[in-house]
Image (cartoon, rainbow, N blue to C red):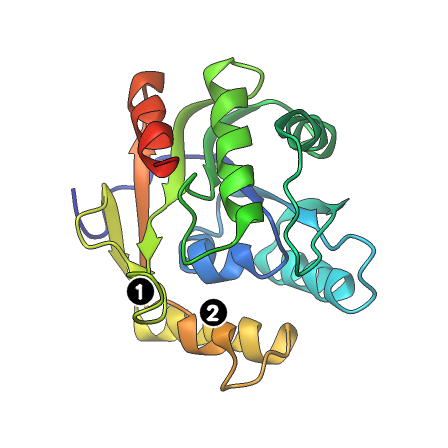
Amino acid sequence: MNLNKEFDFKEIAVIVAHPDDETLWVGGMILMNPECKWTIISLCRGNDTDRSPKFLKVLKFYGANGTMGNLDDSPEQNPISKKKIEKLILFLLPKINYDLIITHSPAGEYTRHKRHEETGKAVSFLWEQKKIKSRQLWFFAYEDDSKSYYPQAIKNADRVIELPENIWLKKYNIITKTYRFLTNSFEALTTPKNEAFWCFRQGEKIKAMLKESQK
């Protein structure tokens, strides 16, 4: 399935590990569908006096609702228990029913950030257990071939969207002017011009991906 398919969701929750993930991996889709009701939650950096205010500005720019948690985000990336992450997600989400939920892949988007992977796995579990509900669950679909290049959309993902230039520029400006990442930073150099997603309706397919990501 490829390129700019009909988008028929009204209420959408985006669950990410960090402020800026929502823009890097799905910002174009948010910008292209302003009529939708977007809820965006970040599990980390709620107490960060730099990133938190910027995230709130980004929410306002998107016309989205959202909030932040304070999971440990130290460079050591010490593992966090699945139950703790699941509990935080349920606490931060204002409701449990959506048309669509979008989050990290259990395999992550690049090599590697454990919080991305942990978030994807926790959301998957909650969705399969019907503790959060939506018609579909989408994972970000990006890879970097073990750091061979900056993360890019997986070409054979279920849904691949080529962003119009004006949409990509708005997304890039959020990264460089609102979040204030330098133009030579990982975030600015990554900012994908194509956005890609794995799309699920049934839990068995998710379990297969989880198994593969743990190899």
Q: Which residue matches tag 1? A: 163
Which residue lies at the image location 78% right of the left edge and 69% below the top edge? 50
Element type where label 1 sits in the image: loop
> What quarter of the picture does the C terminus occupy?
top left
Which residue lies at the image location 63% right of the left edge and 58% below the top edge? 19
Badge 1 density bin: few <14, some 14–19, many ≥20, Cα 10 Å = many
Q: Evaluate if marks 2 and 1 touch, with contact meaning CB atoms under 8 Å apart.
A: yes
Q: Is residue 212 visible?
A: yes
Up-down relation of residue 38 to residue 47 (above or below): above
Up-down relation of residue 33 to residue 191 (above or below): above
- The type of residue carrying mark 2 is Lys
Which residue lies at the image location 33% right of the left edge and 49% below the top edge? 141
Q: In this view, does 142 lie to the left or right of 71?
A: left
- Work out how far the residue at label 2 is from the one at label 1, CA to CA, in angstroms: 10 Å
Q: How many labels does the image show?
A: 2
* Observer-nearest of 167 and 175: 175
Q: Residue 150: x and y, percent?
A: 36, 70
Q: Which residue matches tag 2? A: 171
Badge 2 density bin: few <14, some 14–19, many ≥20, Cα 10 Å = many
Which residue lies at the image location 50% right of the left edge and 72% below the top edge? 187
- The type of residue carrying mark 1 is Leu
Q: Residue 118: x and y, percent?
A: 55, 39
